[in-house]
Amino acid sequence: MADGKWRRAGATLIRVIAVWAASALTLLALAGILPDFRLQSDDGDTITRTAFTAAWGAGAFGLLSALVWPVLVRALLIVPALVLGALVFFLNGSLLLIALRLIPDGRGDAAPETAVVVAAVMSAVASATSTAFAVRDDDAYRRRLSRLAYRRRRGRPADQGGPGREGPPGTVFIQLDGVGHDALVAAAAAGLMPTVAGWLADSSGHRLTPWRTDWSSQTGASQLAILHGSNHDVPAFRWYEKETRTVMVSSRPASALEMQRRAIERTRDGGLLTIDGASRGNLFSGGAGQLALVLSMAARRGKGSRSRAGYFAYFSDPANATRTALSFVAEVVREVGQSTRARARKVTPRVKRGGLYPFIRAFATVVERDVVVAAVLGDLFAGRTAVYADLVAYDEVAHHSGPHSRDAEKVLERLDRSLALIAKIADRTPRAYRIVLLSDHGQSPGETFAGKYGLTLKDLVRAGSGLPVPRRAQRTRSASEARDAVRIALHRPVEGGVDEQAAKLSDPIVLASGNLGLISFPDIGGRASREQIDRRHPALLSTLANHPGIGFLLVRSEEHGSVVLGPGGAEVPIAELSDEEGPLAVFGAGAADAVRRTDTFPHVADIMVNSMYDPGTGTVHAFEEQIGSHGGLGGEQSRPFLLWPRGLTDPLDIMAAESAEPGESASAPVPPGGGLVGAEAVHRVLTRWLQESSGPQVPLRAEGFAGAGPVDEPFPPGAPGAGPTAARTARAIEPLPPPNRQDPAPDATGTTA
């Protein structure tokens, strides 16, 4: 035992000396290269004296970085996150100037702008040297990464610590935002994602299945259901609520918080992550007590708001900060080069990628990725029971470059490296972990509606309503979670993305969610009927239904109930909708059920518009400026994936057991089209897996309710969060098929009340 301690101490000392020596040599080299940086007196010094000066300066800079840097970063967390990232270089340079002032006899000096460069290079060299030594020493490598978890673990009650590696395993859910099932399979087969390919090839590794989204195939609807069990009344990424005259936007913090509150109220359950969970980079908390970059929590104030905690955990290491800042700049340059090349080659389809977009892309593909991955690593070492993290990089790039573009493929390669790192660290943590990979939706390619037809959906609606139309088609703002995340990081308000709120009350409000459009008439109380619309705008519905870029409409009829309208005068009552014939036949299995479910939502739009879909090419036409889109029906966007370790129960067995009547065998038929149907079904599967992995749990406590923070008392009977899922989580796992279930039966919408 004592010999082991001495060996570890000796290895640590050697590593410190090596990093110190590398930093000193870097200082010497930079002093010889940069004209405004010196390590000698004005009269010159011997080589020995200059080397001593470099060693002194490197040591002083290292100590300042270790002792002062974390304090500076914590103090500067009051500034916007991106401003903090920009300050990284200047803070590092300031520490170097202080270190040079500490050199005896004033032998160290540098111009301020030179100090910034020298400090950045030294941090990078020190990080590379330390990592090179640590990789050869598993214990040192683990200690280096576990520093990310230390600050969170310090304040954690002892009775909440994760069990040893011989105990129940934890579960890590990694969401690859926007990566469809077919895109993942193709990337693994092409060698772009060797980690995923290895999981699929290993007979004892993972299993893969697609699942089918709801009509609203976007992160707001899917992730809300996955984390909180319900996406009832979420008809799109954006929708208009007449009673309050507000536009709900899934990526707006206030809207996300309200969506989360409604889901919890409906399910009476705190969320998937209520038991010792962590939510990283998500739109919603999932009831987790540990939060970082969670959009819904950005709308809160006070102690309960911890959405930016991950920035401190990551940027408190100057090497991390420097590396991410340099990668950010490289990504901006990469995007400028790629977009310039696309214009020069006249690649089609394409959208404008200038302005702030290169910086938004760099934030999504570098800053968010690095911070979220670092937070997950910290959670692994802290022994969290359940971790759910969203990596948005692919989704953002695919929107503007296309889901099958080389740009998007490069992002998949980098995401795979992040998965490899997480898997490697999971093998070194005190607790064993199971890694579940999933996506919230896919992406369908295609030219934009405006690019194909020369007018936006809003222009078409105004023309069909007899209202003035602009002479030139205006761009429709893209629904971008990354764009709104950047605004939050800059402490800027997230816009609704529409200018219709300022329009006349009699004008229709037109909103876009990928290839799904929503049209509302704010001066008509309740849901407008087809007859009311025809009386006011006789040509509107026929103009929309017969346009070649539109697949079908959903509208309420006073005489026939809700109906689906299609080209050539097609009109089908919603009760008679079929996947085999009529306007929805081209959209495949499950389309009719998805439309029927959305029709029951209180805030379904007066007119729901789905673009055309070409099954031969897999293309749709987005009503936004996106050549890779999601939000409606049609193609890969509705076909995400679920990848899970083989030791867990097959999702179809779980769903069959749930649908079986008490006393019957779990052999319920698979829904039309096969596989999992709806994000709420995915939530039930993940909940079951957590029970299988962790066994009996402690009762739910109030931190599960909307991320409100821990309290000492458990939920009182009947309080939000004390519902049937809580009871299921609190008891031991039961074998399939389950005995007499006490859960309430699904209602007409397919959700559990």
Image: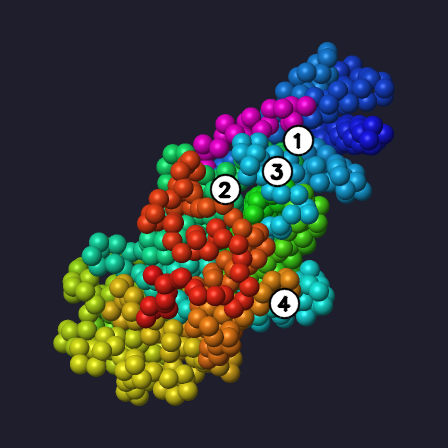
**Which residue was labeled with disc 4?**
207
C-alpha separation, residue under disc 4 versus residue under disc 1: 47 Å
**Which residue was labeled with disc 1?**
119
**Which residue was labeled with disc 2?**
290
Q: Residues within 10 Å of mark 2 (few under 14, many from 20)?
A: many
- Residues in magenta, as a range: 63-80
Look at label 4 and name its amino acid. Answer: Arg
Among numbered discs 3 and 2, the one appearing first in the sequence: 3
Look at label 2 and name its amino acid. Answer: Gln
**Residue reaching furthest to the left:** 535
C-alpha separation, residue under disc 3 versus residue under disc 4: 31 Å
Point out residue 32 in the picture as x, y percentages from the top left corner.
77, 29
Among numbered discs 3 and 4, the one appearing first in the sequence: 3
**Residue reaching furthest to the top:** 105
Point out residue 559 in the picture as x, y percentages from the top left corner.
17, 81
On the rendered image, what quadrant is the N terminus found in? top right
Residue under the point 37% across and 40% down: 300
Residue under the point 61% across and 60% down: 412
Left or right of 484 in this view: 16 = right
Label 1 residue SS: helix
- Which of discs 1 and 2 lies nearer the camera? The answer is 2
The quadrant holding residue 747 is bottom left
Look at label 3 and name its amino acid. Answer: Leu
Q: Are marks 2 and 4 in contact (CB under 8 Å)?
A: no
Among numbered discs 3 and 1, the one appearing first in the sequence: 1
**Which residue was labeled with disc 3?**
148
Residue under the point 21% across and 67% down: 527
Up/down of 58 relative to 152, above or below: above
Q: Are marks 3 and 2 in contact (CB under 8 Å)?
A: no
Q: Is residue 734 magenta?
A: no
